Amino acid sequence: MKAAVFHKVGDIRYETMDDPKIEQSRDVVLRVTSTAICGSDLHIYDGFLPQLRNEVLGHEFMGIVEEVGKDVTNLKKGDRVVVPFTIACGKCFFCQNHHEMHCENSNPEFYGPDGGVLTEKGGGLFGYSDLYGGYNGGQAQYVRVPYADYGLRHVPEELKDEQVLFLSDIFPTGWSSIEWGELKGGETVAIFGSGPVGLMAQKSAWIQGAGRVIAIDPVNYRLERARRVNKVETLNPHEVDVIEAIRNMTDGRGADLCVDAVGMEAERSILDKAKAVINLEKGTVSVLEQCFQAVRRGGIVSVVGVYGAMFDNFPVGRIFDKGITIKQGQSFVHKNIDHLLDLVVQGKVVLDDIVSHVLPLTEISRAYDIFKKKEDDCTKVILKPF
Ligand code: NAD
Ligand code: ZN
Ligand code: ZN
């Protein structure tokens, strides 16, 4: 088959590799009809998450069941399905408690070069380095899907791929980031980052009852899309003092909920500027710190942007003083996906209005390049392997 294979930082190639096979009785092999590039893929592409081995990236994908393992009884060849990005067995302690992102059976302990445990057991992801189980991902013509009987969801025929693909990750992720904010109705929600995840958080904030939604991003075309598709207010940190603006918009108190939908991206641009010095530039405030400043006393900061261990900027004093609650992590896909699919089916949310590019998988190198550099008004790329 053909697949997009990560070789080294900044180097992803379209090439031939062995077809995936059924390895375990609960596997299926999926023929991928649509896949996407996530901001999380950029962490590997940029070398923020180490991956030394060649692997197929991609954890947002859907397709047609091609082959079924002997213990998969709820799926058959030809079924059209969407795939949660978190790999979960459905039977362990975490899966039973709907924390499938920590599934104990999908990712063994991973040891560092000194023999110590680098990542604890739990939490396998498609195409997300050996730290997360070393599974090949879905930026390919075919992919092996473990525990398929638990994870896969049938998709109604009348919906196009573009309408449901984002149930695999970014819609549930945007949804979780707001759900963690425990809105009661009418709250002000400030969402840092208006990339794909931020855009999905904006949609989720309206549905979950926000009274006011403010999107923050330094890239104007992304703010323009946010205003157009999600009817939010926007702030560009290159043009205004974001903290001051948010306080002015909230009677001086700050937002009830601040969402970090940026993650290492902000530090990445700072890194580019500072030529690989990890420390923040003098006078530069990280997005996370901005969330802590922009949230009201007693408010909630929800972090869906991904941080590696080297970015532990933790202002414990401010968090204590303001009594801030912090929630973060990989999102709840399995718990929310059925409800979120219903919202799409009922026309209560539109997801495909964030797509800027639909490209053949052959163009994978260019796709990563424009998504990373934010060229050609790129917001979200969907790739077609066939
Ligand atoms: P993205 O890289 O396209 O979006 C990040 C956005 O942040 C960009 O639009 C960028 O312009 C903006 N940004 C950069 N610096 C900023 C600043 N100082 N202030 C405000 N905005 C700033 O990626 P994405 O696909 O939207 O993903 C966003 C984050 O969410 C990534 O860290 C990704 O890894 C993470 N993610 C987490 C989960 C999860 O389960 N927790 C799932 C998917 C993605
Ligand atoms: Zn993702
Ligand atoms: Zn499990």
Image (spheres, rainbow, N blue to C red):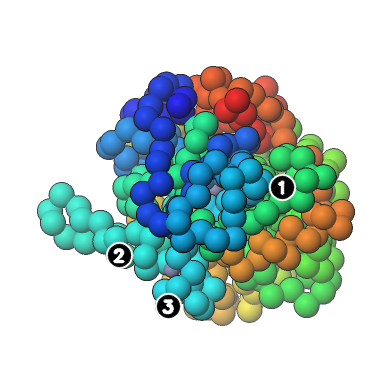
Mark 2 or 3, nearer chain start: 3
Task: Give the residue at x 41% y 46%.
Answer: 22
Mark 3–mark 1 contact, CB under 8 Å? no
Mark 2 close to ligand 3, CB under 8 Å: no
Question: Up-down: is 266 above or below 140?
Answer: below
Mark 3 close to ligand 3, CB under 8 Å: yes
**SS for tag 1?**
helix
Q: Ligand 3 falls in which quarter? A: bottom left
Residue that carries the numbered disc 1 in the rendered image = 164
Residue 251 in view, yes or no: no
Percent coordinates x, y for residue 267 in the rendering:
46, 44
- Give the label, 2 or 1, closer to the camera: 1
Q: CA distance from mark 3 to mark 1?
A: 29 Å
| Crowding near the residue tagged with mark 2, few <14, some 14–19, many ≥20 C-alpha atoms within 10 Å | some
- Give the label, 2 or 3, closer to the camera: 3
Which image quarter holds the C terminus?
A: top right
Query: What type is the residue that disc 3 sits on?
Result: Phe
81 with respect to 142 (left or right): right
| Crowding near the residue tagged with mark 3, few <14, some 14–19, many ≥20 C-alpha atoms within 10 Å | some
146 with respect to 183 (left or right): left
Residue 93 marker: 3
Task: Give the residue at x 67% y 22%.
Answer: 376
Residue that carries the numbered disc 2 in the rendered image = 120
Task: Give the residue at x 78% y 67%.
Answer: 208
